[in-house]
Structure formats: C-alpha cells, structure tokens
Image (cartoon, rainbow, N blue to C red):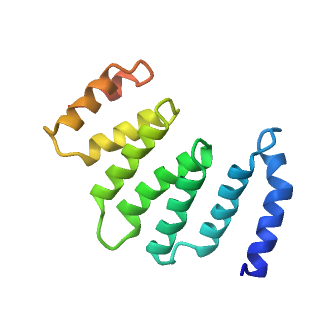
Amino acid sequence: MLSLRLKVFALLSILIMPVCSYGEDISGIEREGLIMRVELNRLGSSADPSEKESILKKIAERCKGTEEGEAAYWDLADLYLEGFPEERRKEAAEVLELCLRNYPNSRRAVMVKCRLVELYDAGTPRRSELVRQLKNDSTLPTALKSTLN
C-alpha cells in the first residue's frame, strides 16, 4: 500500500510534470519513471544502496526508450561506483554497456563511452574499440581526443 506522502507526490507529479516538460505532454511510462524518481529522492543519501539499486533498475526496465530510462542507467553506474562500500566497477561497466545498446544515438553516448574507457583496463579489446570510436567522433573536442590512449 502506498504511503500518504508517496500518493501526494504521485498526484503532484501527475498534475505538475506536464507543465515542466517543455510544454509537451508526457507518456504514462515517463510519468511512472518520474514517480519512481520521487520515491528514490525520498530515500535520501543515507538510504541502503540496494534499495536505490532496485528502484533504478525498475526505472531502466519500465521506462525503456525514455529520458528517464536512459538517466537511470547513468545513475545506476554512479551508484555502483560511489554508493556501495566497495566499488563495483564490473556492474557499472555492464550497466553503461546496456545504456549504449539501448540508446545508441543518445546525446549521452560520448559521455558513456568516455566513462567506459575509464572503467576498462588498458589493452582490452573493448577499451581499444571505444577509444577508436571516440577519436573518430566529430563532437568530441580535440583536446579531449589527445588524452585518449
């Protein structure tokens, strides 16, 4: 059963969010993602990371093809790297690879690839492939390209 606070947040998000989405109405899937975000924010920074992980995974799965779904992958990678007592680099890389697979033309694709380059060990084939892609990307500034090895 939903708590009264969550019901109020859900109602407010349904009423207010269409106005906040640059004048465009949002789909039911996006709305569901925003409601789950409210629940995630309600947990706060001191919450159990496993609880946050569960909510972010739900957002990523239920909100495929939306901005919320894409952001959930990025936030989940952050959680794996900074939210648990021990860094979970493998899980972070897996989530970012899913993000690239599900959102190949995303505006975040370059950031995701850069982050993956940081996560993979030097000399691995996947890292080398990502470095090659980034060096050939016209949107990446030359100064950043020169730092890729």
Identify which residue, 119 or 29, lies in the foreground. Answer: 29
The image shows residue 134 at horizontal and vertical percentages of 33, 27
Looking at the image, residue 83 sits to the left or right of residue 25; the answer is: left
- The answer to whether any part of residue 58 appears in the image is yes
The image shows residue 49 at horizontal and vertical percentages of 45, 72
- In the picture, the quarter occupied by the N terminus is bottom right
Task: Farthest residue to the left: give it.
Answer: 123
Look at 83% across and 38% down and name the residue there: 23
Relative vertical location of residue 4 with respect to residue 29 in this rendering, above or below = below
The image shows residue 126 at horizontal and vertical percentages of 23, 37
Look at 27% across and 56% down and name the residue there: 90
Identify which residue, 143 or 52, lies in the foreground. Answer: 52
Tell me which corner region of the image, top left, top right, bottom left or bottom right, holds residue 97: top left
Looking at the image, residue 133 sits to the left or right of residue 1; the answer is: left
Look at 77% across and 66% down and name the residue there: 10
Looking at the image, residue 16 sits to the left or right of residue 75; the answer is: right
Look at 61% across and 44% down and name the residue there: 67
Relative vertical location of residue 111 with respect to residue 72 in this rendering, above or below = above
Tell me which corner region of the image, top left, top right, bottom left or bottom right, holds residue 141: top left
Looking at the image, residue 4 sits to the left or right of residue 67; the answer is: right
- The answer to whether any part of residue 147 appears in the image is no
The image shows a total of numbered marks equal to 0
- In the picture, the quarter occupied by the C terminus is top left
Relative vertical location of residue 142 with respect to residue 130 in this rendering, above or below = above
